[in-house]
Amino acid sequence: MIKKGELTTRQIVILIIVIVSFTIILILFWRLNLGEETDKELCRNSVIMRSNSILPTGTLPLNCKTSYLCFSGDGSCEKMTNPKIEKVETQDEVYEILAKQMQDCWWMFGEGKIDYVGKDLLSRNKYCSICTQIGFDDSLKNLQDFSSGTIDQKEFYENYLSKQNLSNKQITYMEYLYSGVDDISKVHSGGFDPIDLDKQYYIMMGIKSELNKWVKIVGTGVGVGIVTASFLTGAGLPVAVVALSAVGTGAMGAGAYVGLSAAGESGNEFLRPTILEANSKEFKALECEEVKTLA
């Protein structure tokens, strides 16, 4: 009976140790934000699997979700439902978070190395992905850096992305995202609009599909106008995306900056990660065939 009692006590002690250890592990997981990393990994893995599958590309859906992020001065956010809240005090802190979101977006979708949309029959269609939707809490305007009600997007692109290296890498965000472009002001016409704290924005990218080979041969005239005015003007070299009436919507005037379009290693043309006002005329002018992210 004594031995049996000692064994029971030992089992209880072991059980307590296991529970405490499991709780500590869960706390560590929560603090490291591994849930978010898992979503990113799931997205990237689904992109790779889709590109490598022998099945038609459309039969394998991408497991990529749009994340929702709210910048706040006091830790609250009334403008979005259940977003991840980033409490910030300076514009540089916002720049750092935006740059990391753009980096993650480019990484999740294969860094221009993967064709995850396959070939279209009659035209080269554009497929967009909204990686992050961003909002701003009113409390941000109480901070000195945001008293104007805007964030300087020009400074973000020209100074922060061009000069700041990725974490633990000897390469700037500009070089990583835009294939060696060191001065974005040289490859776009028109200025950067400031980011308005009263509006929401997308961090998004896109890919343009290829044509089936027989379409290129049999119907060389098919879709030429669409191809010419797609993402946007010419693949191969980084160019400023200027949405003219040729895009087909007539929603934008000449000189409006949207983003950079360039050929990736996969041979597809990619709209590199960019920041666009949510549901704006610039976004609609892209005329995305599909948005390849889940809400």
Image (cartoon, rainbow, N blue to C red):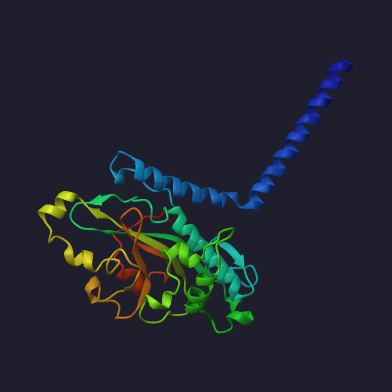
Q: Give the residue furthest to the right.
A: 2
Q: Give the residue furthest to the left.
A: 218
x%, y% of residue 6? 86, 21
Q: Give the residue furthest to the bottom.
A: 148
The relative height of residue 91 versus residue 271 in the rendered view (above or below) is: below
88 on left or right of 14: left
Residue at position x 52%, y 76% from top?
159
Q: Give the residue furthest to the top.
A: 1
x%, y% of residue 287? 29, 66
Q: Quadrant of residue 84?
A: bottom right
The relative height of residue 172 versus residue 155 in the rendered view (above or below) is: above
- Specify the quadrant that holds the C terminus: bottom left
Which residue is at the front of the view, 119 or 129? Answer: 119
User: Quick check: can you spot residue 2?
Assistant: yes
x%, y% of residue 251? 28, 76
Q: Quadrant of residue 280?
A: bottom left
Residue at position x 73%, y 37% from top?
19
244 on left or right of 196: left
Residue at position x 55%, y 52% from top?
36
Residue at position x 50%, y 51% from top?
40
Which residue is at the front of the view, 142 or 191? Answer: 191
x%, y% of residue 191? 40, 82
- Specify the quadrant that holds the N terminus: top right
User: Quick check: can you spot residue 66?
Assistant: no
The relative height of residue 54 versus residue 273 in the rendered view (above or below) is: above
